[in-house]
Image (spheres, helix red, strand yellow):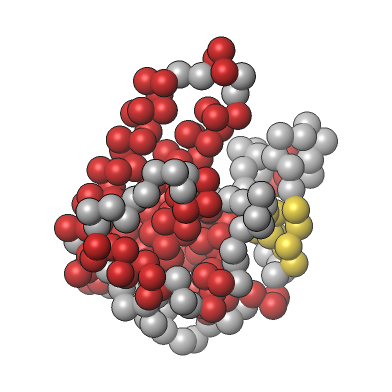
Amino acid sequence: MKLRYSQTSPFVRKVLMAAHEVGVANRIELSPTDVWSPDSPIVRENPLSKIPTLLTDDGMVLFDSPVIMEYLDSLHDGRKLIPAAGPARWLALRQQAIGDGICDAAVLRRMEELRPATLRSAEWDSRQRAAIFRAFDRLEIDAGDLPDPEQQTVGGLAILSAMGYMDFRFAREPWRTGRSALARWFDNAARRASFEATLPPRE
């Protein structure tokens, strides 16, 4: 398998954590990809030109991260990251959605930061920031429903990746303040080998 990726993408990190959790990371060739380059090979594989994009051994091209997560979860016979049925399944998928939503908003803020100062919108940034911190407030309320760090789900990995991205790009905005239960969960989950193996580069 080949994964089109960037070390700094929280969506890539979520996928790579899943690969480590299910024991298939050593089967994935990592291919650094510049999605902004018009000559990038990703445009021939993924019309959205987004990472992560996975090229499977049998020739399929899969995107985006929730689809790739489900595919990786199908490649092993152990405990699944996506519960098969019932309330546990819907909880894991909802948690993945809120983790991905935090990442969506945070990446949009990061892209806004990279625009020329005269083109930046403080209102746009404020809207995305508000969504992120509302999501963290909800996760604090629901902290008792987060997965055991030793038995991760797609939801837990998505939330873990979102928190890691906030620490990476927005350390000036401490999300832990007033969210002690969520912070404790993160501190325990961040000890997982899959989290440590996928740390972004220092910039």
Give the quadrant of residue 7: bottom right
| Residue 145 at x, y percent in the picture | 22, 68
Which quadrant is the N terminus positioned in?
bottom right
Residue at the extreme left of the image, as rendered: 141
Is 29 or 187 nearer to us in this picture? 187
Residue at the extreme right of the image, as rendered: 39
| Residue at x-position 41% and y-position 28% | 125
In the image, residue 97 above or below residue 58: above
Instruction: For residue 84, say whether it is visible.
Output: no
Circle count = 0
In the image, residue 126 above or below residue 3: above
| Residue 154 at x, y percent in the picture | 41, 66
In the image, residue 185 above or below residue 201: below
Instruction: For residue 116, say whether it is visible.
Output: yes
Is 59 or 164 nearer to us in this picture? 164
173 vs 3, left or right, is: left
Give the quadrant of residue 36: top right
| Residue at x-position 38% and y-position 59% | 159
Is 137 or 102 nearer to us in this picture? 137
Give the quadrant of residue 38: top right
| Residue at x-position 36% and y-position 28% | 126
Residue at the extreme bottom of the image, as rendered: 78
In the image, residue 127 above or below residue 81: above
| Residue 165 at x, y percent in the picture | 49, 52
| Residue at x-position 36% and y-position 36% | 129
